[in-house]
Image (cartoon, rainbow, N blue to C red):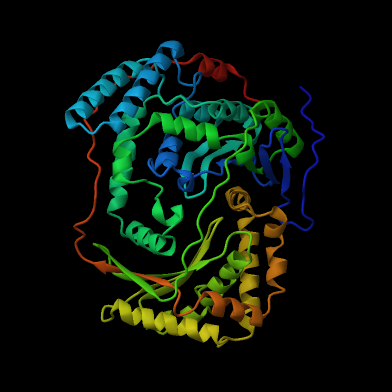
Amino acid sequence: MDLTTSTPFQTVSGDPLGVQRTTLSNGFSLFLSVNRNTPRIHTHISVRAGSKQDPADTTGLAHYMEHMLFKGTSRIGALDWEKEQALLEQIAALYEAHRHSRDPEERKQLYAEIDRLSFEAAKLAAPNEYDKMAGVLGAKGTNAYTWVEQTVYVNDIPSNELERWMLLESERFRMMALRLFHTELETVYEEFNINQDRDFRKVDYALRGALFPKHPYGTQTTMGTAEHLRNPSMVNIQRFFQTYYVPGNMAMVLAGDFDPEEAVALAEKYFGSYEARPVPPFTYEEQPPILQPIRQEVTGKEAPYLMLGWRLGNSRSDDQFMATLVQHMLFNSQAGLLDLRLNQQQLVLESEAWSWMHEDYSVFGLYGKPREDQTLEEVEGLILDVLKAFREGDFPEWLMEAVIRDLKLGEVKAAESNEARVQMMNAAFILGIDWERMARRFAWWETVTKEQVLDFANRHLRADNFVAVYKRQGEDTGVIKVEKPPITAVELSRDGVSEFARRFFELPSPP
C-alpha cells in the first residue's frame, strides 16, 4: 500500500505545537502534532459524548459504556460469537424486563436468570484480549475516562506500532459486544460507592446543581444515580453507541514521532469505512439568572473548606479565556492577589482560584480553607474582599503582563510532553473551539486591556451572582450506596484466544 495522502492539512502559522488538522472522507477528525524527541506516540480516540448526553432515565450510561469498550467485539474476545450473541440478546431482553418490573419477586427471578445466562455466556469469551494486544504493541498507560462532554480512550505506543494500533482501535470501535456486562457491574458499583464518600464529589455535585438547575451539568452526574445503576439497560447502551460513536463525532489525536501523511493514510485505511451518520443536536434551556448568593452545605469527614462559583458563557465566547487570565491574576502561587493578600499573610490556611471549561457554559471559582480558629463565613468574607479589590482595579499594572508570560512559559514546557500536546488538542475538539483560536490565544491575551478585564469581572464576578458551598466537617448520614447483587463467579477461558487476536499476535512488528 502506498502510505501517502493528498489530503490538505489545516495549519496555523506560528503555532508552537505545529498542529496539522484534517478530516477523513466520512467526517472522522484528526489532530496531529509531530514531536521527534522520543520514538513514541501519545494517542487519544476521543468521542464528543459524556454524561451530558446520558438519557435522563439511565444516567451513568456513558461511563458504564466506557468500561464495556474494553470487552471486545464480535471478533476481539469472541471464541464462538454466534452462540455468545444469542445469549447476549437474551440477557439484554431480561434486563429490559427487570428495569420495568415493579414486582420484587419477579425482579429477583429475572436477575437469577440473567445471572445463569451470563455464567454460560462467559465461557464463550476470551478475557482481557484488548489489554493483551495493547501490551504486545508495547503500549503504556492504556486507559479511558468519561466526563460531562467526552469519553476518551488513551494509549501511548512505540512509533513503529502505529499501524497495528490503528488496526486494533478500528476493530474496537467498529461495534460493541456487551460481554461480561453482568460481572462488570461489580466494578462500576464499587467505583460509585467509593465516590459517595469523597467530600470533593459532594461539593462538586452541590455546586453544579445550584449553578445549572436545568442543565445536565447540574442535573446529572458522570457516575449516575444509584437507582439507574441498579437498573441498567443493554439496549440503551447499544443505542448510545450507535448514536454518538460515529465518525463526525470522533477524533484521533496524536502527538509524537510519526509522519503525518502516513498517519492520515492509515486512518483512512482503517477508519475511513465507518458509516457517516448525523449526530442529534444537543439542546438545553437557558439557566435562570442568579440574582443573589445561593449558599449550600455538605458534610463529610475531611477538613472543612469553602467553594464559590460563578456561571459564565459558552466555549464560543471570550469568557473561558478571560476566566483563565483572571484566575492566574488572583492565584499563581507567587504574586496573585490571593497569594499576596491572604496566603502569604496567613489570613487563611489556603485559598485558590480555578475555572471549568465546558461547551455550553463555563465556571469561574474560588476556594478557601480556614485556619483552626476561623469559620467558613469568615473565609468567604476575606475572599470576597480580595475579589472586590480586583473588580476595583486594585492590582499592579505589571500583573497582567507577568501572568501572560508565565502562562506562555508553562505552555513551552508542556510542549515537551506528548501527553500535554494531546490534551490541548483534545480540549479544542471536545469544546468545539477552532484550533486557530486556541493556538492564537496568547496573541489575543496580549491585546486585552485592564479596562476589559475589569469590565469582565464587574459583569460576571459580582457579589450577588455566585453559589457558595460550605463543606462542613461531620458525619454524613445521607450517603446512598449501591448494594451489589448476587453474582455467580464466572468461569473464564483463560487460555482461549480469538481468531482476531491469534492473527494479530502473528503480525510482524515493524523495525
The C terminus, quarter of image: top right
Front-lying residue, 24 or 1:
24
Question: Residue 40's spot in the image, x, y percent?
Answer: 62, 40
Please indicate whether residue 194 sits to the left or right of residue 499 in the image: left
Q: Is residue 112 above or below residue 386?
A: above
Front-lying residue, 195 or 163:
195
Q: Is residue 331 above or below residue 259?
A: below
Q: Can residue 425 be seen at all in this image of the molecule? A: yes
Please indicate whether residue 336 sits to the left or right of residue 184 in the image: right
Question: Residue 114's spot in the image, x, y percent?
Answer: 28, 23
The N terminus, quarter of image: top right
Question: Residue 9's spot in the image, x, y percent?
Answer: 78, 43
Question: Residue 168's spot in the image, x, y percent?
Answer: 57, 27
User: Which residue is pictured at 25% across the width and 42% down the height?
Assistant: 482
| The quadrant where residue 247 appears | top right
Please indicate whether residue 106 sits to the left or right of residue 378 in the image: left
Front-lying residue, 374 or 231:
231
Q: Can residue 494 be seen at all in this image of the molecule? A: no
User: Which residue is pictured at 63% across the width and 66% down the height?
Assistant: 318
Looking at this view, name the residue that lies furthest to the right.
6
User: Which residue is pictured at 47% across the width and 48% down the height?
Assistant: 52
| The quadrant where residue 218 appears | bottom left
